[in-house]
Image: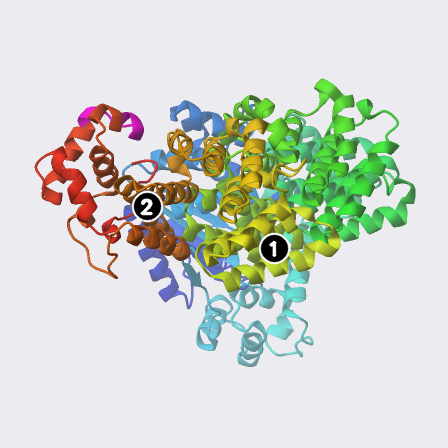
Amino acid sequence: MTGPDATWGGAGSRLVGRESDVASLHAFVDRAVSTGGALLLTGEAGVGKTALLESASQHAAETGTTVLTAAGAQFEADLSYAGLNQLLYPLLDDIDRLGAAHRRALTVALGLSGGPPPEHRTLSRAVLDLLHQAAGERGLLIVVDGLPWIDRASSVTLGFIAHGLAGSRIAFLAARRSGEEGFFDRTGIDEYEVDPLDNVASAALLAERFPALAAPVRQRLVAEAQGNPLALLELPGSLTDPQRTMQTRLPSLLPLSRRLQNMFAARIAGLPAPTRRLLLTAVLDGTGDLGVLGRAAAGHLSTNLAPAERARLVQVDRAEDRLLFRHPLMRSAVVQLAMSEERRETHRWLADHYRDQPDRRAWHLVEAVAKPDPEVASVLERVADATLQRGDAVGAVTVMLRAVEVSPRGRERSRRTAEAAYLGANITGDLHRVTQLLDGIRRTDPGRAASLAAAVAGSSLLLNGDGDVDTAHRLLVSALEMESDIELAEEKNLAEALHMLLLVCLFGGRPDLYAPLDAVIRRLGARTPELLWITSKTIADPARTAPEALDRLDAVLSGVDSEVNPSRIVRIGIACAYVDRLASCRAALWRVVEGGRTGGAVASAIEALFLLGNDGFFAGDWDRTLVTIEEGLKLCDNRGYRVLALPGLFLRGLIHAARGRTDVASSLADEMTGWATPRGIALVSHYAAHVRALAAFGEGDVEAAYQYAAAVSPAGVLASHNAHAMWLVLDLTEAAARTNRRREAAAHAAAAREAGIAAISPRLALLVAAASAVAAPAGRDVELFEEALSVPGTQRWPFDLARVRLIYGERLRRMKATTEARQHLTQARETFRWLKAEPWVERASAELRATGLAIPSGGATHLAVLTPQQQQIALLAAQGMTNKQIGARLALSPRTVATHLYQLFPKLGVTSRAGLRDALTQLSATEIGDPPRQDE
């Protein structure tokens, strides 16, 4: 005696005890196919989520709504875009209607064509575009069952879709078990918890489906099932007729999950052997494609499937030509019941069937082998590399570890283990697994523990975990020296080793550390990886070598928006950091961050967050930068990345120092030096000195500012292999001049000028010119300050620009050029106000008071109603500049300048340009609003 499976539903079936749930879901579907929406069903296994999904699908289909379905399969969980393939299978013929970029992205992701991997957002928009087409006027319902078994790449895309349905005619409905972790934990999509049935509904379900059960048996089953519909419907089938009628005692209780598994196994074991083999093929294939099953059944598909259909284990969806299991546990039972050799034989057949699909074939090959197989390991390694290039670092580690499992003992197994360890340390953020993997190499293959791949992983662990720069350096250099012929070393491992060595040298901050790296690069010559060569020029000793690499870096940046590999994107960002080109990487770096947030490359996301923070500090976006930094620091704390956290502490310290929170800034500097100094991490000592120098300026302690800045690089010298020295050129020069060290000031300005760092970026050109002006004798200084302020593009660096205006305004005031001083001091002060840099606001205010202006505590008059751009135009016009000259300075047309002047005259109470100077001079400096943004 068996009963229908209510977890499935089916045409005409009634879900006992689910009336409220069904009504809620039908209402959601009706609403969402008109206005868009997403809902996630959660609940324990067997509670009826699949039945409710089926009810919603049937309701939608009856109203003319198109329904697309996908179900996660354990054996496809690591196969990129398998879930998307299922979902979009009925729409494949419509892909040609998409635009070229979207069509290309979809066909590559679905394996329909070759080409470079699609960028995630482009792919997601392509899918959404296709779904909008399918929705038409009648609407579309997307149903996804078994979310945790949907592959990560598809999950990320589905999450994007689910968040972008507002205002569409698309409904998204998915289900997963409660307590199962997955990507959708972090999406914020509304959830609907499917609760177990109460005792009344449970008894009613048993009475309806099994009316012959004796009352005591029904009560026992209700108590045992605890409201789980699947258990309620399946348990009676495991009883004998005498047991159902209480003529004999019921069997003793077993754990519910084991009982259900055993029950499924019993139902499957009774099927004919060809049927069991076909079901095994369906489970291991994971697609449900009847075409695949038809070939496996050699023309006997209907005959072989019929017993499973009669047993209500499966259902054939003729509309989509797909075989569907009625519950995920049935799939598990099919595999559990099969012998290991049966499973391997089936995987071998599937590997042969998918020989034109490398990823899918590789997964079947690895399951088909019973012992290590070097050929299969090589195939998996190629899949891992391809997966990484598609931007799925977590998936790449998973595949590489499977390659390790089927690799024979020896060099290749150790190398692959080390590469997986390296990816874990530097990309996915799993330091604990790195330690385990390296320990495994040392135990099983000690002779390979010093190999290049193992050295890369070990040095990454040493740097990121313990901050042991010197040991990490020795480990990498030794491994490079052990390579008998560096020119013949495997390109991938060599590149990773050199990138890692460069990073170790950067943190170490000592010129001697770079010698082995430079020697290898010289030996490699033209074979040196392009990005490595560029980065070695822009971060090792940029004051001397960056200019020669800038054209090649800009060429790399021209394609950064199409990059998908998170590690490469971060490396490009690192190459940009000291040469002020991070703005070009913003979009790509944010993609890395989003990937980390959704379970991808966490370590890369941390680095991306701090690179974005670096850019945000210099761009003046301080409030947002603090939020970005905090996110990165929390990840570092959770993952144990002490060294990766240090750039975040540095940026946080700079902002607090500039805003006058000296106590916080000093505490952060102490934390950095306390941890880094004993470990010889010179770069972090420079971080701390920079923070302290900026805080000292805010406190008015110019002598301390000089000492801290000189600790990074002495006056008159841009220290070798010390990128940070470029950032402190103006700080050191100004502090030297204000402490009557005129000779040191002049020497340092000359050193910066002669090094040619002004050619690196507009910001450095501004700082070098300003430093020269500070150190110049009277009469020459004004010309140099004007030269500094005329550097194009400096509006992008508001804090630096405001500091230069402040110093210039102070110099002009002392020269009795009051009107001109007020203009520069006013602009500087308002930028500082916008940045909330209070010590600098007060310094500018004091100078303005010294010009004779009274600075009230509040209130505003006419100037407060001007826009930031109108304020700047008014100030320039007051200096006597023509509309054409103003337009050239601000990148505006003369006509636009004239329009702004026409609008601002009445606001200031004047009728012509002649009245501007007096009007502006009489107004309080507190009346000026935010400085103009770059894009205004």
Residue 36 left/right relative to 271? left
Nearer to me, 125 or 15: 125
Q: Residue furthest top?
A: 526
Quick check: is 888 in the magenta stretch? yes
Q: How is the image coloured?
A: rainbow
Nearer to me, 709 or 258: 709
Report the span colored magenta. 887-895
Measuring 23% from the left and 35% from the top, which residue is drawn there?
A: 873
Q: Residue furthest left?
A: 911
Q: Nearer the viewer, mark 2 or mark 1?
A: 2
Q: Which residue is the site of mark 2? A: 825
**N-term-proximal mark, 2 vs 1:** 1
Where does residue 771 sit, x and y in percent of width and height?
49, 37
Q: Amino acid at mark 2?
A: Leu
Q: Which residue is the site of mark 1? A: 636
Where does residue 592 sit, x and y in percent of width and height?
54, 42
Quick check: is 918 in the magenta stretch? no
